[in-house]
Amino acid sequence: MTITITTAPCCWGVDDVNNPNLPAWERVFDEAAAAGYGGLELGPYGYVPLNHQQVAKALTDRGLFIVAGTIFDDLVSPAKREDLLRQTDEICAMIITLPQPEQVTGQRFRTPYLTVMDWGHDERDYAAGHSDRAPRLSDGAWAGMVANIKAIAELASSKYGVRAVIHPHAGGYIEFADEIERIAIDVPAETAGFCLDTGHTYYADMDPVKTLRRYAERLDYAHFKDIDQAVFERVLGQKIRFFEACAEGVMCPIGRGVIDYPAVGRVLQEIGYHGFITVEQERDPLSVAGSLQDVKESRDYLRSVGF
């Protein structure tokens, strides 16, 4: 395997850009570099300023690159189409101008990627991790979401040469095994790939190793995180939003949790994965004082098991 490990602003509690407690983006860049990462994701739309020159200089000054941008929004509503395409335009125009890593042999699509995640539905947020009680979309609503995803992916590819990757996410309408299977059929590989996340996979009651193997042909990019099993069992017994569970500490530094990363490494070797893996650890931004230590611990652990 030829793999480059990167990180993301969610490790500093950056998920909801309207949260008043978010750290400065410059701090995230500083600490990502200090922890030994060569690159990171841009984070949710609106967090890092859409000023190409300013952000490019900040990355270059720290020896960093950008591996992906993110759309983290309601992908279901037809009324969101115009806004989603505007975000796609602005994010892709930004990320293709920023410092890029060396591309590796065997990597399917060059960076930067556009990670696409559904979010923003109370009825699913409170059912995160509970397939049995999570409502599913009607056929018409599902078709509308698929149309939005295809429109995003086609714009990103045709105008900017950016590969869109669909990221199943706890609390969204693409989370559980049946939904991942359905989106794999309805959005073909030539339109968009997958970004599978070991933590969200486990949260949704799937085996991360088996899921990586099952969707090997769609795996263009990956996220790694780990789960504290004791906290996980506790929060599943509560009526709690996904990011409230993260504030409780359900995500922990990689190597401390329940996910078997040596086995993950073996399956990635088996399927011939080459490219980029981003370390994530969602948390409350009020606990940002621990971010540097945690992302360094995750990086050091992954290095110790062959990543």
Image: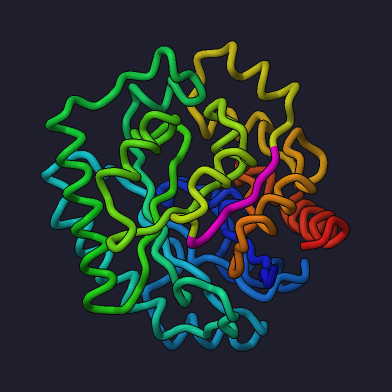
Which image quarter holds the N terminus? bottom right
- Residue 193, percent across and down? 39, 58
Residue 300 drawn at (x, y percent)? 84, 60
> Is residue 95 depicted above or below 276 in this figure?
below
| Residue 158 left/right relative to 2 | left
Q: Is residue 289 visible?
A: no
Magenta-colored stretch includes residue 114:
no
Residue 40 visible to an observer of this rendering: yes
Q: Nearer the viewer, residue 56 or 276?
A: 276
In the image, residue 225 lies in the stretch drawn in magenta: yes
The residue shown at (21%, 68%) is 155
The span shown in magenta is 220-226
Residue 168 position, x and y percent, is: 44, 42
The residue lying toward the viewer, choosing from 142 and 211, is 211
The residue sitting at the right extreme is 304
Q: Is residue 56 left or right of residue 299?
A: left
Quadrant location of residue 145?
top left
When the figure is inspected, residue 80 is found, relative to residue 307, above or below; the finding is: above
Name the main secondary structure of what is drawn in magenta: strand
At horizontal 59% and vertical 80% (from top left) the residue drawn is 104
Residue ID at (73%, 26%): 229
